Image (cartoon, rainbow, N blue to C red):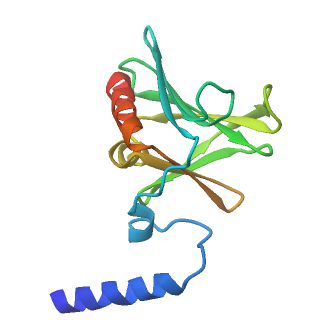
Amino acid sequence: MRLRLIAALIAMSALAACATQAPFPVAGSAATASAPTPTPGYDWFLNTDGQEAMLAYGVANSDEIKLKLACQAGSSALELTASSDKPGREIYLESGGDTERYRAASEPAVVHDGELLTAQAKTKDPVFQRFRSLGWIAAWADDERHVYAAHPAAKVQIERFFTVCG
């Protein structure tokens, strides 16, 4: 039994090495569970103000934010905001093989070209629990995967955010 499992894993790995980029992630695949490399100049930043907490991925001290998670302390409810090049109806997230699609509202962005998509979620959703443990999450838009990976020092900020939100 164990030899058949190992042989199957080797065959899957060989097949994956030959494949081009898949348009969507496959739940539980080793490729989506591996840690992506953080992007220089971009990171996760935590801001708390009273009972509100915000975790945003972007460039420090700028209006360039790719994805923002916001909550009221202890609520376990999240408000998601994602940047988009064009209007959309969902925010599609993935982390370590867990995926989720959130129905979103779209409105023109004020500080940059494009749109802002907003949606509601829960901290307990598997995609956010995986993000919390891995330190990266990806957003899918028009069959393109945009990975938002934390630099090592920012991983503690992600954990603090989820601790505050509940």
- Percent across and percent down for residue 1 are 16, 89
The quarter of the displayed image where residue 115 is located:
top right
Q: Is residue 74 above or below residue 123?
A: above
- In the rendered image, the vertical position of residue 113 relative to residue 9, given as above or below: above
Place residue 24 in its image quadrant. Answer: bottom right
User: Which is nearer the eye, 151 or 86?
Assistant: 151
**Disc count in the image?**
0
Against 96, residue 108 (above or below) is above
The residue shown at (74%, 45%) is 88
Determine if residue 29 is in view.
no
Check the image and name the residue furthest to the left.
1
Query: Residue at coordinates 43% horizontally, 65% vertically from top-left?
Result: 27
Residue 130 percent across, percent down from the top left? 37, 49
Left or right: residue 152 compared with residue 15? left
x and y percentages locating residue 119 in the rendered image: 60, 35
Q: Residue furthest front?
A: 40
Q: Residue at x 45, y 64 (%)?
A: 32
Can the viewer see residue 59?
yes
Q: Looking at the figure, which quarter contains the C terminus? A: top left
